[in-house]
Image (cartoon, rainbow, N blue to C red):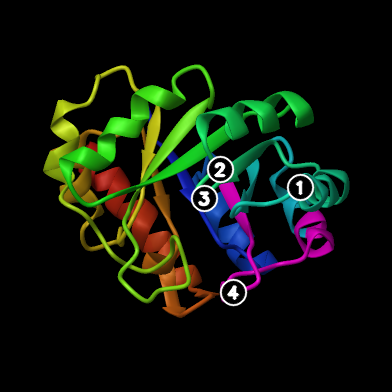
Amino acid sequence: MPLDIKICGLSTPETIAAALDGGASHVGFIFFPKSPRNVTPQQAAELRQAATGRAKAVAVTVDATDEFLDGIVTAMKPDMLQLHGKETPERAAYIREHFNLPVMKALSVSEPADLLPIQGFAGMADRLLLDAKAPKGSELPGGNGMAFDWRLLAALDPGLDYMLSGGLNPGNVAEAIRIAHPPGLDVSSGVESAPGVKDVGLIREFFEAVRKAGS
């Protein structure tokens, strides 16, 4: 079964095309002003059109209010909402029901104890995203180019539906797949030439590395 792959933090037609041509199952758009990958709902609405029928468009937010989410959903019409802040299981379930959209909840991981909240999101979120914990002082909950010890995931329920994120790039994704056997991958800074600047060549290299790892 092919891996789901999300290229996150997209902001140009060229990189959207590279992600789709590579076989991305999901394309992510960041709605967080502190991020160099931040886009407006209107920009995302235009960019996501190319993904219609080819990949799921994901709106990534951080502790967003209902009003903020409503603006995104109305303008962009995403296929999924990703919650990348400190949202509780109850908040995730509320957002899923209120907006009638699947929800992916990001959890920050650096040690075994960080995996304990997974159980609390069962039935509350449709999918999880396991990301590296942000370094001290970072204003970004994700997209920091940091990886965590993938061996921590060996204890997970084999049936857990999640995406592995954090520090993935064309050079290490094969090792991540070998160690963690994740059902999905999420990459952002690992396919950038500068913060917030996606690189078409690196996106292609990432997909090629994933294909070689599965051959």
Q: Which of pointers 4 and 2 indicates the residue nearer the eye? A: 4
User: Residue 127 location, x and y as percent?
Assistant: 48, 29
| Side of 22 where 154 appears, left or right | left
Query: What residue appears at the point 65 percent right and 71 percent down from the top-left corner?
Result: 33
Res 34 label: 4
Rounded to the nearest whole Å, what is the CA distance between mark 4 and mark 3? 13 Å
**Res. 93 image quadrant:** top right
Determine the secondary structure under disc 2.
strand
**Residue pointed to by mark 3:** 84
Q: Is residue 10 above or below residue 181?
A: below
Mark 1 vs 4, N-terminal side: 4
Q: Amino acid at mark 4?
A: Lys
Rounded to the nearest whole Å, what is the CA distance between mark 1 and mark 4? 17 Å
Mark 3 vs 2, N-terminal side: 2
Determine the secondary structure under disc 1.
helix
User: Residue 69 location, x and y as percent?
Assistant: 76, 47
Packing grade of label 2 (10 A; few <14, some 14-19, many >=20) is: many
**Residue pointed to by mark 2:** 26
**Residue pointed to by mark 1:** 69
Query: What residue appears at the point 82 percent right and 49 percent down from the top-left corner?
Result: 67
Q: Does residue 31 show up magenta in the picture?
A: yes
CB contact under 8 Å: marks 1 and 4: no
Query: What residue appears at the point 14 percent right and 31 percent down from the top-left corner?
Result: 154
Rounded to the nearest whole Å, what is the CA distance between mark 3 and mark 1? 13 Å
Q: Quarter holding the C terminus?
A: top left
**Res. 159 image quadrant:** top left
Q: 44 or 99, which is in the foreground?
A: 99
